[in-house]
Image (spheres, rainbow, N blue to C red):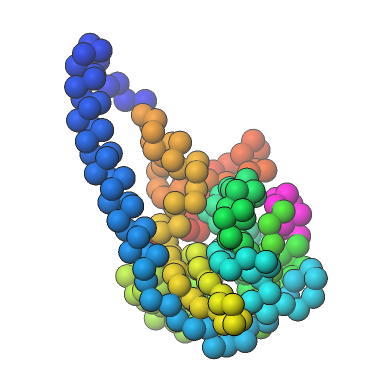
Amino acid sequence: MEPHKIVSRDEWTVARKALLTEEKALTRARDRVAALRRDLPWVKVEKDYVFETPAGKRRLIDLFGPRSQLVVQHFMLTPGSDHICPGCALGADHVDAARQHFEQADLSFVAISRATLPEIEAAKQRMGWRFDWVSSHGTSFNYDFGVSFTPEQVASGNAGYNYGTSPFALEDLHGMSVFARSGAGDVFHTYSTYARGSETIVGAFNYLDMVPKGRNENGIMSWVKLHDEYENVSNVGSCCAAE
């Protein structure tokens, strides 16, 4: 750790109050952006997406359960691959604790991947997660919501990820999407975010951002592993490194 300037308590308090002014401005900016996010127009979902789940085939509206809002984690799990994305897993590790609370506020959660259901169930069992995780295998869902791309799109050098702002491209990438349903049974897409836009769900980052070493990275999320690998596996690069 690099040494920091050492000062008296009085000098530290002056510096801390100056930072507090910046923190309060950030809080107000975050509230303003959150309000803009909630006020986005909606798009009616016209396609009848059908997913493979442990309970059988389910439509998108079925994934809401008894609630009117649904957050989808687009989890990078490619059909035929046994690679579990460490970045997606880091976000997923936070879900079961959080959903004990947000489910009481009319919000459901589901992870969706292109992998087959047996591949998903194997990964879920290994990681010990309890949230719903379903398969969009054979559907256009991931492609329609900007997280999966054809080999031709990947080869082009700019598949259009993150609304065309990032040239980073793989056949499967990560993101979050939000849906709402009406009393009449219509489903609407209200919001999606990609790349670093989904960092807000990662509580571990918030802890690290408070301490002197910060995220202690050699590259974006360079230290992140699956939670069952930290003791016995050397560090690996992240597959979620798109800015």
Magenta part mainly helix, strand or loop? helix
In the picture shown, does residue 81 fall above or below 196? below
- Residue located at (32% from left, 51% from top): 30
> In the visual, does 224 lie left or right of 210?
right
- Residue located at (61% from left, 81% from top): 185
- Res 106 → quadrant: bottom right
Residue 214: percent from left, percent from top: 38, 36
In the picture shown, does residue 160 fall above or below 175? below
Question: Which one is in front, 219 or 196?
Answer: 196
Number of marks: 0
**Residue found farthest to the front:** 183
Residue 159: percent from left, percent from top: 41, 77
Question: Which one is in front, 110 or 44?
Answer: 44
> In the visual, does 51 lie left or right of 142?
right
Residue 124 within the magenta-colored segment of the rendering: yes
Residue 124: percent from left, percent from top: 72, 57
The N terminus, quarter of image:
top left
Question: Which one is in front, 15 or 2?
Answer: 15
**Residue found farthest to the right:** 55
Can the viewer see residue 157? no
Residue 102 within the magenta-colored segment of the rendering: no
> In the visual, does 12 lie left or right of 207?
left
Which stretch did the figure color magenta? 122-129
> In the visual, does 191 lie left or right of 6?
right
Can the viewer see residue 69? yes
Question: Which one is in front, 219 or 174?
Answer: 174
- Residue located at (36% from left, 29% from top): 212
The C terminus, quarter of image:
bottom left
In the picture shown, does residue 203 fall above or below 37? above
Residue 4: percent from left, percent from top: 27, 22
- Res 107 → quadrant: bottom right
